[in-house]
Amino acid sequence: MDEIEIPPYFLCPISFQIMKDPVTTVTGITYDRQSIEKWLLTAKICVCPVTNQALPRSKEFLTPNHTLQRLIKAWISSNEAKDVDDQVPSPKYSLDRIHLQKLVKNLEVPSCFRTTMEKIHDLAKQSERNRTCMVEVGVTKAMVMVIRKSFKQGNTICLEEGLKTISLLWHEAMVKNMIKPLVGGNMEFINSLAWILKIYIDNNDVKMVNEVMTLMKLTIDIVDSSLIGNLNIEFFRQIVRVLQKRGLFSKQTIKSALHVLISTSSLGKNRTRIVEAGGVSELIEIELENPKKSVTELIFNLLAHLCLSAEGREQFLRHAAGIAMLTKRILRVSAATDDLAIQVISVIAKYASSKDILEMLRVGAVSKLCMVMQADCASYLKEKARDILRLHSTSWNNSPCIQVYFLTRNQR
């Protein structure tokens, strides 16, 4: 059944539901009686929610709007066959841009802030048409400013509504090229998200960690590359904490965390910070749990970046299962994983100590490289494996697998 277009003036500006008992205030705005009476009773500063003009708290100043009530009843009667009552909780209607602009302005009024944030979030949830209108009148910018202001003031009020609203508006704002200028040109929004992420991790708020990590990935994907080098160690600690508590969060959240780390690891100082936050050890631990192919490929991609640094290689080799885990995955997951794993082995072998060289032999890395040489895989991978074997041929020459390789490589 098609959704019914509800005339916007039938809806209460507070509840956004069809008014059952419309009353008009001294400011000329009509509300549902129940909603405005509750507002008058609970508002710290008694002002009109729409105009911000002062309102008397007494109910005596509310005038019944009989004409509007008759119109609403007639409209409902004419739509009875369409089950209009069942659709009232989530109406679809052409959003009043002027009213929406007033809502945005109300964000600056402390007494209206919480109610206004809730209204804006409800509107964003209702329809794509609402979201389009909200982006056009600047709601995305307003929500970004709310998040940044909350970060500066250490204020957590309505963070959830703000984050969810930005997420709902993100796609439409991207289409209109209106999101990157808001979040991609400075560090404040990223730092705000890192601060919020810490709060939700500390509180074990699984739902909101999932929300923030999705938003973090979207932000990192469009942020100016010049800013990537300004990320601090605290940023990386929070992302790694998501990996450490992976059992609590969704698989998509873990993937988002890995994507963020990969996107930021192109710079050497960021690789150092990820390692300092314990990133390499955590990646090995995740891989030991035999994740899905897509996660393994992300992990190996990140390890290939991190092991380019001396700190990354050191942390990798300190983990008792590092080389063994890497070895086991070769020729078992995908061609992409093989490529990345051999990249890691290559850089480790280049700087390896005698102890590390023997460890590679002990856990089967040398045998696996010989298998790559004889497997049906890309020629460049075979060449990489050959270079690694040559690099420490003196140390590995007595290995049975090396002997077998030389005996069989020229067979026809």
Image (tube, helix red, strand yellow):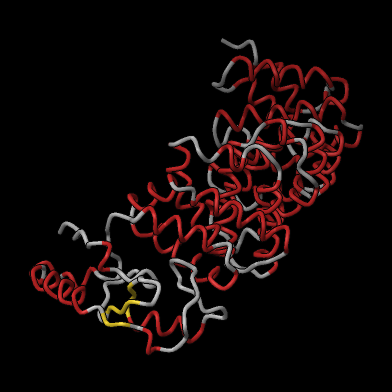
In the picture provided, is 183 more to the left or to the right than 232?
A: left
Vertical arrangement, residue 48 with respect to residue 94, above or below: below
Location of the C terminus by quadrant is: top right
Question: How many numbered marks, from 0 up?
Answer: 0
Q: Position of residue 408 (x, y in %)?
A: 65, 17
Location of the N terminus by quadrant is: bottom left
Tell me where residue 377 sits by quadrant.
Answer: top right
Vertical arrangement, residue 56 with respect to residue 122, above or below: below
Tell which of 169 and 108 is nearer to you. Answer: 108
Tell which of 189 and 340 is nearer to you. Answer: 189
Toward the right, the furthest residue is: 354
In the picture provided, is 11 more to the left or to the right than 371?
A: left
Tell which of 244 and 195 is nearer to you. Answer: 195
Residue plotted at (61% across, 69% down): 157
Q: Position of residue 130 (x, y in %)?
A: 36, 53
Tell me where residue 200 sits by quadrant.
Answer: bottom right
Tell which of 243 and 121 is nearer to you. Answer: 121
Q: Position of residue 354 (x, y in %)?
A: 92, 32
Residue plotted at (70% across, 60% down): 198
Vertical arrangement, residue 366 with respect to residue 100, above or below: above
Tell me where residue 63 sits by quadrant.
Answer: bottom left
Residue plotted at (62% across, 30% down): 338
